[in-house]
């Protein structure tokens, strides 16, 4: 079968298409014909050699993929041939809190991921995908969708009527916007593009802020919330945004840190947290149980994730480059088996 592989630190140019063998599924394993794979900022970090848990050997990249079950091991009970499935980011994290043991071995990092024509995974690492979604749409669920779900409703514990600030219009932020809208949350989203902010309003954003024309955007957040601040901030930026995110949260509010697109510096003022009884919460995707909860919600609400652009399998490097250029709105997907 055809697959892509990359060695951490080789940059996008190091992504190469290769022929790989695929073993038959063992007793509790499932073979999946991959139809679509979506990209995350993590994939760029691995290519650039900036991801801590990447291995030294070449690895099939990408954690997020969806496809069709084509073979099952003799003792598989959760799936059968023909089922539509997606892989869980952490194959061993089924439910409960994260631990050192269940959060190792994320797909596409230290172990092979999904950017291949077919994969073999343990049945416990897979979930059924919502019936109304295409494979292209379902491929956006495992990392960005689950991360947004965890930040908003598991770690964040938000309820209808609560408020959330979303930074930027990348995959996680747009997923969070769609989930928040469906759950009845008040949503504020930022971008440097008025065109993207208009798209966000069409998706249901309650308010928008252009952070280039309003550089002190935390003050606008406070104005929009009548001085209270938001219940939760989805922090994806890092350097230059964390202090403003803390200032944007209400007293007792949460800043959910899901990434650092611009890196992190020494900008944290602990007194801003202590004086406001605020908390920073690191979000590292989520469990298979969270994924299943997300899928039920997406099915009931009939949410269709926003896909910015779909690239054919042969143009995987171009897809990576499109992600690196940061002009996208929503998710970037590679179609593996049309």
Image (cartoon, helix red, strand yellow):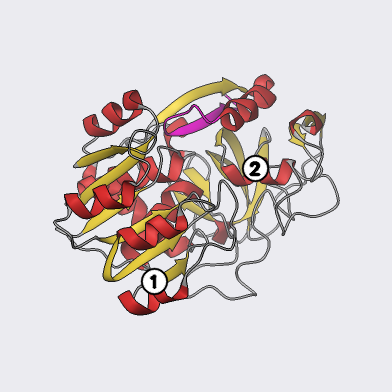
Q: Position of residue 327 (x, y in %)?
A: 49, 26
Is residue 142 found inside the magenta-colored segment of the image? no
Indicate the secondary structure of the residue bearing disc 2.
helix
Query: How many discs mark residues in the rendered view?
Result: 2
Badge number at residue 272: 1
Q: Is residue 113 left or right of residue 272?
A: right
Viewport quadrant of the N terminus: top right
Q: Is residue 333 magenta?
A: yes
Q: Is residue 1 visible?
A: no
Q: Which residues are magenta?
A: 326-337
* Residue that label 2 marks: 43
Q: Is residue 131 above or below residue 149?
A: above
Camera-nearest residue between 263 and 18: 263
Q: Position of residue 273 (x, y in %)?
A: 39, 74
Query: Where residue 199 sits: x, y (%)?
Result: 29, 27
Nearer to the camera, 114 or 229:
229
* 298 w.r.t. 281: above or below: above
Residue under the point 29% across and 33% down: 200
Label 2 Cα neighbours within 10 Å, binned few <14 / some 14-19 / many ≥20 = many
The image quadrant of residue 329 is: top left
Foreground residue among 198 and 17: 198
Q: Position of residue 288 (x, y in %)?
A: 48, 61
Residue that appears at 79% across and 28% down: 13
Q: CA distance from mark 1 to mark 2?
A: 33 Å
Quadrant housing the C terminus: top right
Q: Which numbered marker is on residue 338?
A: none
Left or right position of 72 against 283 = right
């Amino acid at each position: 079968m055809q697959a892509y592989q990359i060695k951490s630190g080789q940059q996008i140019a190091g992504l190469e298409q290769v022929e790989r063998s695929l073993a038959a599924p063992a007793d509790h394993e499932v073979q999946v014909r991959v139809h679509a794979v979506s990209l995350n900022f993590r994939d760029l970090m691995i290519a650039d050699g900036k991801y801590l848990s990447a291995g030294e050997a070449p690895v099939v990249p990408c954690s997020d993929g969806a496809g069709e079950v084509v073979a099952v091991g003799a003792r598989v009970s959760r799936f059968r041939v023909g089922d539509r499935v997606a892989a869980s980011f952490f194959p061993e994290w089924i439910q409960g809190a994260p631990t050192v043991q269940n959060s190792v071995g994320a797909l596409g990092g230290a172990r092979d991921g999904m950017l291949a024509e077919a994969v073999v995974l343990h049945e416990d690492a897979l979930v059924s995908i919502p019936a109304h979604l295409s494979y292209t749409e379902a491929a956006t669920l495992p990392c960005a969708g689950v991360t947004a779900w965890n930040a908003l409703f598991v770690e964040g514990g938000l309820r209808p009527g609560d408020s959330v600030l979303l930074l930027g219009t990348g995959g996680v932020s747009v997923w969070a916007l769609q989930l928040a809208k469906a759950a009845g949350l008040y949503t504020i989203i930022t971008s440097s593009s008025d065109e993207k902010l208009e798209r966000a309003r069409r998706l249901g954003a309650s308010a928008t802020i252009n952070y280039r024309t309003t550089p002190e955007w935390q003050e606008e957040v406070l104005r929009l919330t009548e001085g209270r601040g938001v219940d939760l901030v989805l922090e994806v930026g890092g350097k230059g945004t964390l202090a403003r995110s803390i200032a944007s949260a209400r007293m007792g509010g949460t800043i959910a840190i899901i990434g650092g697109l611009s890196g992190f510096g020494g900008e944290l003022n602990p007194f801003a947290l202590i004086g406001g009884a605020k908390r920073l919460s690191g979000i590292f995707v989520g469990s298979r149980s969270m994924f299943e909860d997300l899928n039920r919600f997406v099915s009931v609400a009939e949410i269709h994730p926003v896909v910015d652009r779909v690239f054919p399998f042969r143009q995987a490097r171009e897809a990576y480059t499109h992600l690196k250029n940061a002009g996208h709105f929503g998710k970037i997907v590679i179609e593996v088996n049309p």
